[in-house]
Amino acid sequence: MKLSTSSLSIAGVVALAGLAQSQNVMTEVRISTRGIDEEYVEIQGVAGQSTDGLMICVVEGDPSGTGGGEGTLDDVYDLAGDTFSASFYTLGSSAASAAFPGLIDNDLFGNDLFENSSLTVYLLSVPDPLKRADISSMEGNDIRDPAGSMTTIFTTDPAITILDAVAIWDGDMGDVFFDGAPVFGPDGSFLPSGVLRDGGCPGDWCNDTFVNFEIDGVPNPPYADPTPKSVNPTTACMTTPSQGICPGGAGIGTPYCATNANSTGASGALSATGSVVVATNDVTLMASSLPNNAFGFFLASLDAGFVANPGGSEGNLCLGGSIGRYVGPGEIQNTGTTGEFQLAIDLTAVPQPTGFVSVAAGETWRFQAWHRDAVMGSATSNFTNGLEIDFQ
């Protein structure tokens, strides 16, 4: 595949650069309970972090949904103006606030936050307040892009980054879900009360254990009691790879840029471990949630960018300017049976089109992984998210 680049406007580049914030993911989503809905979404982050730029949005998956058919933007919740008081932040209904005293950070939107039908729930990063207002104005409208597809503007608009997405299914045939979000349910023939990550981050979403309809403190597999604003219990459930990239651990760098699902149904994830101190020369890149036995390699650039489906790829190129490829001896990798590959890179010899360059303290470098894939037997390719590292 030949990588092509195109120039973005200065405003577009600035918008993409502004997405480099602490990575957030959803860790528990509770949307359907008995009686008045005690609904909430739990987001993991860092204590003291601003919620500015974060949005929760819901897209209808039922062709005959109450507020509109499939692809309708049912709900928009702009979380701007608040902060994480701890490592979790919760958006909840008034009923949830009463049921979980002191554990719901934002109950300003009242009750009935979610329709009890098949839907896709998104956690978005939208730094530009004008763009957030634009998204809010689309509530009640079909936001598929292009019309009739399983892709929404959340993927195609470079000013929007999907930090995490999860879809919940009520079991009705013909329901659809969007932007490669993992799908969970039904619970028997019903919409699950909610879904949770096994043990929180870095665990993946349980696909055989749902959040209980009520809090009773009694073990009731395959259900788990809701635990807003605290780490989910480890349930030893079967899991499905998540779309959001868990923060913390020994990781370095900040993920950015929209991704498209690969043939596994998940979006490829790029992370890094080591040190941001240039002098230590200790950075390892890892690409995960990829197809098995697929070849791939890492890319590097000083510039962010956005090119949808370059060269016919199924993914998005998140780099701009001069882009180097790690395709030297031993650098082209294979995912094997684990669906991942990694490479310890030399900060004194980062490949660029004109040769190798050294990383300097104070520079910000962006990385991404490209990999081969196959869809319906046809060869194609895809990309992970971009990863931005501020070096010291």
Image: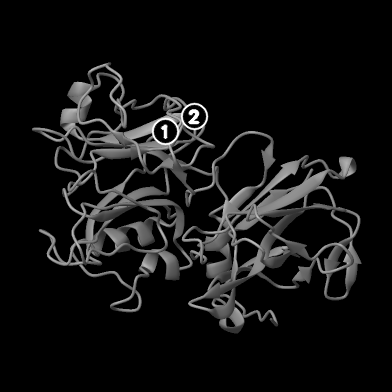
Image quarter (top left, top right, bottom left or bottom right) of the N terminus: bottom right
Q: Counting other residues with Cα less than 10 Å from the Cα at mark 2, is it few (<14), some (14-19), or many (20 or more)?
A: few
Q: Amino acid at mark 2?
A: Gly
Q: Does any portion of residue 122 appear in the rendered image?
A: no
Q: Is residue 354 above or below residue 23?
A: below
Secondary structure beneath disc 2? loop
The residue depicted at 37 percent of the width and 68 percent of the height is: 153
Quadrant in which residue 113 is drawn: top left
Q: Position of residue 375 (x, y in %)?
A: 51, 75
Q: Position of residue 59 (x, y in %)?
A: 27, 59
Question: Which mark, residue 48?
Answer: 2
Q: Counting other residues with Cα less than 10 Å from the Cα at mark 1, is it few (<14), some (14-19), or many (20 or more)?
A: some
Looking at this view, is 305 or 63 the one in front?
63
Looking at this view, is 290 or 392 the one in front?
290
> How far separated are the C-alphas under marks 2 and 1?
6 Å
Which badge, 2 or 1, comes first in the chain's sequence? 2
Q: Amino acid at mark 1?
A: Thr
Q: Position of residue 369 (x, y in %)?
A: 67, 63
Image quarter (top left, top right, bottom left or bottom right) of the C terminus: top right
Question: Which mark, residue 83?
Answer: 1
Q: Position of residue 382 (x, y in %)?
A: 58, 70
Circles 2 and 1: CB atoms closer than 8 Å: yes
Secondary structure beneath disc 1? loop
Q: Does any portion of residue 222 appear in the rendered image?
A: yes
Question: Which mark, residue 261?
Answer: none
From the viewer's perspective, is 84 left or right of 283?
left
The residue depicted at 60 percent of the width and 35 percent of the height is: 248
From the viewer's perspective, is 372 left or right of 29?
right
The residue depicted at 71 percent of the width and 73 percent of the height is: 321
The residue depicted at 20 percent of the width and 46 percent of the height is: 191
